[in-house]
Amino acid sequence: MIVGPYRISLIETGDFRLDGGSMFGVVPKVLWSRTNPSDEQNRIAMTMRVLLIEGEGRKILVDTGIGHKEKDSFLEMYAVDFTRNTLESSLAARGVKPEEITDVILTHLHFDHSGGSTRLENGQAVPVFPKARYHVQRRHFEHALNATERDHASFLPHNYLPLREAGLLEVVDGEMELFPGIHVLVADGHTPAMQTVKVQHGDQVLWFAADILPMSAHVPLPYVMGYDLFPLTTLAEKKRWLPQALDEKWVIVYEHDPLVPASRLKMSERGQIAAGESVPV
């Protein structure tokens, strides 16, 4: 997909599974299982999809997937599967080498979004993209360093502390145009100061919604994850952005949807905002 001076590609980094009840919060299983059936452990199929943005002299990644540093027990718990693709193989298929990445925008530091930022070298975690600057919101980074009992398991320091130690971490304060036409929009419902990414040129907009809308099934307002620290804040954020995305025909990328990579929004027969048909990116 071309948006202004940028060529945007969807990069698949691997598949995994999470508990369906946790993914859909208060929504009953009889409803969410219609679109997202679960396995015998109540886990639903998910993927880890990131963005590659090329243009204006930059090669920018948005998120990095789960990476390859975790133990087998961890991989088994989340049914992590690299059979179809990895971050490295997907980049190589597009002719992009790790040292060519100039910037990595991390929406947040949960392990399925930031794990691919580092790799093990002689038992030590080191940056995967040695010439890149890694951009994360300051408030979110501070939260990751002092996570609560409720969410500390989502933060694995070897995914991001080596970035700071290598002098590659750039902290961002609030919403801004990070690069020409590339904006970060801050959301506080899922985790403090998660940053979504909006690429805009004129009336053409692509929105990488991260975990506000992890899958197309999360577009309806009540479909809020049980993982969210502040679910009512997520609800307010959806009310803030979804009407605008509908009116302005934004293309929304769903980071974790295994079947619908991206879509625009539509009004359902019941007069509610819903995900439209899948569109190519």
Image (cartoon, grey):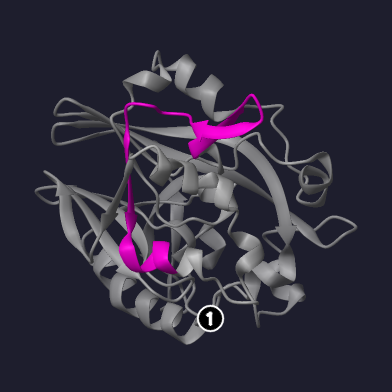
Instruction: Give percent across and percent down for residue 66.
Output: 60, 42
In this view, the residue in front, 82 or 268, is: 82
Residue 155 appears left or right of 142: right
* Farthest bottom residue in view: 232
Residue 270 appears left or right of 54: right
In this view, the residue in front, 29 or 178, is: 178
* Farthest top residue in view: 95
Graded by Cα atoms within 10 Å as few (under 14), some (14 to 19) or many (20 or more), the crowding at tag 1 reads: some
Q: Which residue occupies 84% across, 55% down?
A: 39
Q: Which residue occupies 48% across, 38% down?
A: 117
Image quarter of residue 228: bottom right
Residue 88 visible in the current orientation: yes
Residue for badge 1: 222
Q: Amino acid at mark 1?
A: Pro
Residue 23 appears left or right of 108: right
Residue 136 in the image: above or below residue 159 = below
User: Which segment is the magenta one?
Assistant: 117-142
